[in-house]
Image (cartoon, grey):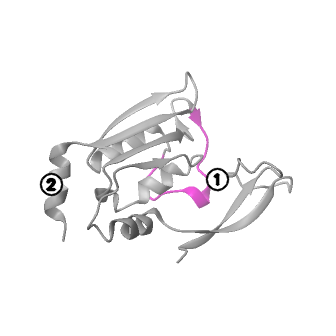
Amino acid sequence: MPSKKLILSGAPGNRGSASLLWLDTDGKIARGEVDTIALDEVINRVTDCGKRRVRLLKLDCEAAEFPILLTSRQLRWVDNICGEYHELSGQHISFPIPDHFKVAGVEQFSIEALGNALERAGFRVVTTRYQDTVFGLFFATRSRLTHFANQLLVP
């Protein structure tokens, strides 16, 4: 069951480009309403509420990786996460986070903020940046000890 509906915008005719972040303000970008499902709901479904684990979560969400991962409360069932990041703020860019994208308590959508949040969730995080840009890759993995500790928490 969808969690909520969001507006998806993208260039007409370009099926490989869409965004929940950059909403059309001048009528030149095709728009549509799409159903969404929260990552936590997906994790709960595929793990049968923690009876199984997600071995790899791969993300390329055009800056939506920040609100998706920063609001998740079920990452304890995920062993590894890899993805592309798209910073909105930090040392390489300073762009205001749109209201519909904001996460309570998070001032910056930077790789440092995301990495710190993933480390607090029990991951070891490695990042790489595409030269001097706001884009890059991140890899988060759990240590054996963290995985063992999570096994003890299974209901």
Question: Residue 149 bears which disc, if any?
Answer: 2
Q: Position of residue 78 (x, y in %)?
A: 33, 54
Q: Nearer the viewer, residue 87 or 62?
A: 62
Q: Callout 1: few (<14), some (14-19), or many (20+) C-alpha neighbours within 10 Å?
A: some
Camera-side residue of 136 and 108: 136
Question: Where does the magenta region start and end?
Answer: 93-107
Question: Looking at the image, can residue 105 be seen?
Answer: no
Above or below, comparing residue 88 to residue 12 in the picture: above
Q: CA distance from mark 1 to mark 2?
A: 36 Å
Rendered residue at 41%/32% (across/down) = 127
Percent across and percent down for residue 27 are 86, 57
Residue 119's image quarter?
A: top left
| Three-letter amino acid code of the residue under disc 1 | Leu
| Residue under numbered circle 1 | 21
Q: Secondary structure at mark 2?
A: helix
Q: Is residue 82 magenta?
A: no
Q: Is residue 126 left or right of residue 90?
A: left
- Please give the name of the residue rendered at 54% of the width and 26% of the height, measured from the top-left corner: 130
> So how many labels did they put on this image?
2
Q: Earlier in the sequence, mark 1 or mark 2?
A: 1
Q: What's the magenta bit mostly, secondary-structure-wise?
A: loop
